[in-house]
Image (cartoon, rainbow, N blue to C red):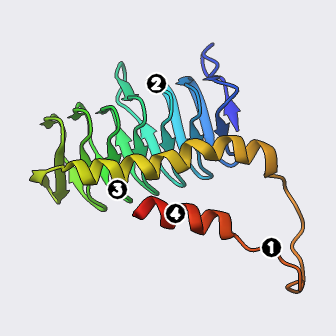
């Protein structure tokens, strides 16, 4: 659902897909080819949220801030299932792993990767290509070219998803048995396998 707040109406580019079970509120700007998954809460009530082109915010993520702060996801940022971004800046082509928490005034420069279930405390600043993990999180090494290639390919799948959702997604009633002619997802599996090579 999309909600206005105090005169701010979210802006969503027509090429993006916001699941109707996500909640996008107030001062939010969503760029091109962005995927917002079900259960995501993107609350631009106390400050702004800017999600640049090619980003994805997956299921059950939360984006919020203290008053007067802007949350910024730069181009091609990839926010994994259940992550929390609170008043932070996520650099271009970064990946935030599942169920990670990124606190206030954190800056991730470009092409950082945050491991799943990491906690980055407030006011931390990480240089480009940092591989970050733990609680509290710290740099464990530099992100390699191979890691960035893997991340970029994974994000490309999500950049295709908005168009596919707009074309194929629709509410339906469940079947009560598996039909003999049930389609296979060979295209998706072959795409993923090809990307891993």
Foreground disc of the pair 2, 1:
1
> Which of marks 4 and 2 precedes in the sequence?
2
Residue 86 coordinates in the image, percent (x, y): 34, 38
- Quick check: can you spot residue 20? no
Residue at image point 39% right, 46% down: 152
Residue 96 coordinates in the image, percent (x, y): 34, 49
> Which of marks 1 and 2 precedes in the sequence?
2
Q: Disc 4 to disc 1, how far (Cα)? A: 18 Å
Residue placed under numbered mark 2 in the picture: 50
Residue at image point 43% right, 36% down: 76
Other residues around mark 4 within 10 Å, as few (<14) / some (14–19) / many (≥20): some
Furthest residue toward top = 7
Could you tell me if the residues under marks 4 and 1 are in contact, i.e. CB atoms within 8 Å?
no
Residue placed under numbered mark 4 in the picture: 192
Q: Seen in the image, is 122 located left or right of residue 64?
A: left
Residue at image point 64% right, 33% down: 16
> Which of marks 2 and 3 precedes in the sequence?
2
Res. 97 mark: 3
Residue placed under numbered mark 1 in the picture: 183
Q: Nearer the viewer, residue 51 or 42?
A: 51
């Amino acid at each position: 659902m999309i909600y206005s707040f105090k005169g701010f109406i979210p802006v969503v580019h027509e090429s993006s897909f916001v699941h109707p079970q996500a909640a996008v509120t107030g001062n939010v700007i969503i760029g091109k080819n962005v995927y917002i998954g079900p259960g995501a809460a993107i609350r631009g009530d106390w400050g702004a949220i800017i999600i640049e082109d090619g980003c994805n915010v997956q299921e059950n993520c939360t984006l919020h801030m203290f008053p007067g702060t802007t949350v910024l996801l730069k181009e091609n940022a990839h926010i994994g299932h259940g992550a929390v971004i609170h008043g932070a800046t996520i650099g271009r082509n970064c990946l935030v792993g599942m169920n990670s928490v990124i606190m206030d005034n954190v800056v991730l420069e470009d092409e950082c990767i945050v491991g799943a279930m990491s906690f980055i405390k407030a006011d931390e600043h990480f240089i480009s290509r940092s591989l970050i993990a733990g609680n509290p999180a710290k740099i464990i090494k530099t992100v390699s070219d191979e890691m960035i290639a893997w991340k970029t390919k994974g994000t490309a799948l999500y950049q295709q998803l908005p168009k596919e959702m707009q074309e194929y997604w629709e509410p339906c009633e469940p079947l009560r048995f598996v039909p003999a002619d049930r389609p296979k997802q060979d295209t998706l599996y072959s795409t993923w396998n090809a990307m891993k090579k």
